[in-house]
Image (cartoon, rainbow, N blue to C red):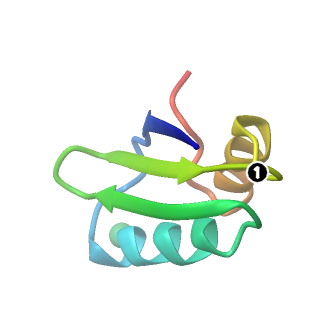
Amino acid sequence: MTTVTYSVPNISCGHCVHTIQTEIADLAGVQSAKADAATKKVEIVFDNPATEEKIKALMAEINYPVAA
Ligand SMILES: [Cu+2]
């Protein structure tokens, strides 16, 4: 199990939090996704077949790209 925390500048409200948590949780292998509008961060716990690459690609796809 791997835990990552990403900075996501586009998070601005509860809707963003909900969208991100729902979309990321749907990715196979993701155990949990917790977004925070105050800190603009997302904490994701995952295992195979999810990878950081896939998570970042999905974040970009839903218009919440991870900060470099
Ligand atoms: Cu929002």
Residue indicated by mark 1: 50
Residue flagged by tag 1: what amino acid is it? Ala
Q: Quadrant of the N terminus?
A: top right
- Circle 1 crowding by C-alpha within 10 Å: few under 14, some 14–19, many from 20: some
Q: Quadrant of ligand 1?
A: bottom left
In the image, residue 27 above or below residue 51: below
**Residue 29: percent from left, percent from top:** 72, 60
**Residue 10: percent from left, percent from top:** 43, 50
Residue at 46 percent across and 61 percent down: it is 33
**Residue 40: percent from left, percent from top:** 30, 46
In the image, residue 22 above or below residue 47: below
**Residue 2: percent from left, percent from top:** 56, 38
Residue at 55 percent across and 63 percent down: it is 31
In the picture as drawn, the residue positioned furthest to the top comes out as 68
Q: Quadrant of the C terminus?
A: top right
Q: Residue 26 sits in which quadrant?
A: bottom right
Q: Nearer the viewer, residue 9 or 19?
A: 19
Residue at 47 percent across and 70 percent down: it is 21
